[in-house]
Image (cartoon, coloured by chain):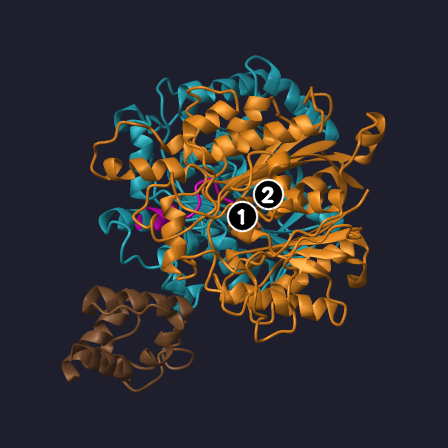
Chain colours: A cyan, B orange, C brown
Amino acid sequence: MAMYINGTGCISHQNTIDVDSFFENSQIDLLPLLPAQEPDYKDYVPTNMLRRMSHIIKMGVAAAKISLQQAEIENVDAIITGTGLGCFEDTDKFLKTIIENNEQLLTPTSFIQSTHNTVAGQIALLIKCHNYNFTYTQQGLSFESALVDASMFLNENKNSNILVGGLDEAIQPYYDLLVKAGHIKKQEDIITEIEKNKTKGFCLGEGASFFVLSNQKNKTTKAQIKGIKKFTSIKEGHDLQSKLIAFLQELNLSINDISLVLSGNSGDAEDDKILNENNKHFFSTTDVVYFKNLCGEYFTASAFALWLASIIIEKQRVPKTLLQERSNKELKNILIVNQYRNTEYSFMCVSSC
Amino acid sequence: MVFVTGIGIISAIGKNVSETLSSLLESCTGIGKINHLQTIHKDNYVAGEINYSLQELEGLGGLKNSNYNRTTLLSLLATQEALASADIKDVTAHRTGFISASSVGGMCHSELLYKDFLEHKSHENFIDTHYTGAHATDVAKHFGITDCVTTISTACSSAANAIMLGARLINNNILDRVIVGGTDALCKFTFNGFNTLMILDKEWCKPFDNNRKGLNLGEGAAYLVLESERVVKAENKKSLAILSGYGNANDAFHQTASSPDGQGAYAAIQKALEVANLSPTKIDYINAHGTGTANNDSSEAAAIQSIFKENIPPFSSTKAFTGHTLAAAASIEAVITILSIQHKAIFPNLNCVTQMQDTTLFPVTSLQKNAVLNHVLSNSFGFGGNCSSLIFSKN
Amino acid sequence: MENLIENLKKQIIEQLNLAEVKPEDIDPSAPLFGEGLGLDSIDALELIVLLEKNYGLKIQEPKDAKHIFQSVKTLAEYITSQKK
């Protein structure tokens, strides 16, 4: 069942607040750590709420607010978020204080703001939403879990508006932990043709992407999500390929109907192997662009991909930095194929409507 | 219709369903001295700690050197029991999912290594097992469940939301069968966190008592196996109960405190009744959230009063048995609710003596046998205003 | 007392991250909670820790703190009274 995207809000490493500027001016400037470009949060959140908000909470609440403004609504029937890491800045703060003060003289603010559903809770407080409120935390499938829930919710509650978001932060202590774990690409190994990487590691990004979804189309509708599918494991070989055909068949589509592919290559050669094989097999004559060149890799990067797909469908153009030349064919169906550390995979089909 | 065909549980009152039932029938609390959690507060507080070390928990599961942390081990043990209880030998026989919940995740392990990490002394990579969803990945993989795996983290209502999601996945024909529940281990992070909120009782908690001073933390895991009507019929399965209603709403009042009139709680209970197509008068018993904090118990009582008016059903909080097990609470209490229904017993609200001043409500304080329990409501309310209610009905 | 009040204002602003508020904006007699500065129950807990950390004074029950934290002035008076 189709879900219409009636409003979007995105904070990321690029300037994604000004969408026109994004199309013209976005750059691929990969570094091991890709912090977000942030707005003046006072434009979106009252000061007395802002004072307690950590980095991810500010990003999430602002992106949510922008999407509601775009959809021209003030409240929703459900708030569903996905975050793999949660509120790490507050977690780190509280943990550090426990260690430094040997469990004495601790203050509550960073503890209460560290729970994973803080963003969803703060949005509910801000817009006074007493309705359904869920937060998913399944690493690279956190946002997809939220979308599957949204799809069921719209099936159960016709004429609803749902606010769905995917967000994660990349603060220094977390970055340091990933370096220690061997997940971060060395500066000297970074190349812009992400799909041609021969080395391990990815560039860590962050961001918050929010959407107002509905089963009703209206004047603010940008695109529709035709289908979403998530997988907790993909075997080597043709597993992903057969699953993709099955996914498209369910939507009455074939490979030839895909106008553009947003491929979730992270730059880690090992992790990107199956995606590259898939792209080679099916899309040698279709435009394939690599969205993590813009946003970096993080658990909910697929939410950035969805935002990107929705504005590409809306504006019928692709940012120059991702695709220098393309045919004038209508951009009808965009396929997002994402992976996180070759463990979690997902498909999304975003279409014009 | 969604049927409960299996249950599994581990908490301070027992390492499995059988031990749990004995403790409940004998009014035997699991709240006591803290032995395993290393915190400077251990001698000044009580908690519902499971009296097994990591190695002993591994032994219970027939594992050795698994490298699983405490949260993951508890989840694995309860899931193992639930699968056996539902007589599931082949998880791939039907579209099967695993929906879990946790707030602690791997923090119980990360916090032991964080000091060394900050001082650049640590060599262990603990980040990959730190995430709240990491245990679900490990447990699902262990049992070969691949069709749908996810984790919900909405503080103290998490497991109720996992159970609700499971039911909806079946009702939306995405899955035929789903193992749902939650897990949380005791850890310094949450212990100190609740202490900063000044809502821990140093002594045994007194839910719904006028002189209550706060909650006791607990730890544990519990899972239900939910199956569709089609599968239950096809396999001629015995069902323990029906999950007939569920509802989630948001208090939107304050980050941690509940509204005085229990608005969020009221809405969640209301929604659960609507889904179950039941009027309030049909509820025979409420397993309350009843943490023992001044705020929650008043707020929940107000909500119960508003919905049930003159017909307040018998109610009790079982948190004076198990402690507040955070993300696992709702699934632990769901198992207790199902045991209630199966054994026609209302388990008591231990340690409650004096009625709260601001209400006429008073819980059941001694075991009641031969209770008529056709429909039971179970509440769970968490930080971020997250309120969830479930209704279980007799088969 | 004047000095203590000024110090308390600065400490409160820092502890509660009241970035937009300057010490001269806080009327020492104005309510801290509800109206006035509009602080809430979490802020009360933060102030209880501030009192212990900076002045060595421990409040056991949050409800006892209500009259102490009514305004900056009452807070200063409490601290002064405990020092005797």
Q: Is residue B126 visible?
A: yes
Q: Is residue A175 above or below residue B32?
A: above
Residues marked 1 and 2 touching at CB (< 8 Å): yes
Chain ID at mark 1? B
Q: Quadrant of the N terminus of chain B?
A: top right
Q: Which residue is mark 2?
A: B23
| The magenta stretch spans residue A177 | no
Q: Quadrant of the C terminus of chain B?
A: top right
Residue, far front? B26
Residue C32 numbered tag: none
Q: Position of residue B218 (x, y in %)?
A: 48, 46
Q: Which residue is mark 1?
A: B29
Q: Position of residue B211 (x, y in %)?
A: 49, 68
Residue A72, quarter of picture: bottom right
Q: Is residue B27 left or right of residue B68?
A: right
Residue numbers of the magenta segment: A80-93
- What kind of element bears circle 2? helix
Depth order, front residue of C39/A170 = C39
Residue B239, quarter of picture: top right
Q: Position of residue B162 (x, y in %)?
A: 62, 43
Q: Is residue A153 above or below residue B123?
A: below
- What kind of element bears circle 1? loop
Chain ID at mark 2? B
Mark 1 belongs to which amino acid? Thr
| The magenta stretch spans residue A85 | yes
Q: Residue at x 60, y 58 (%)?
A: A71
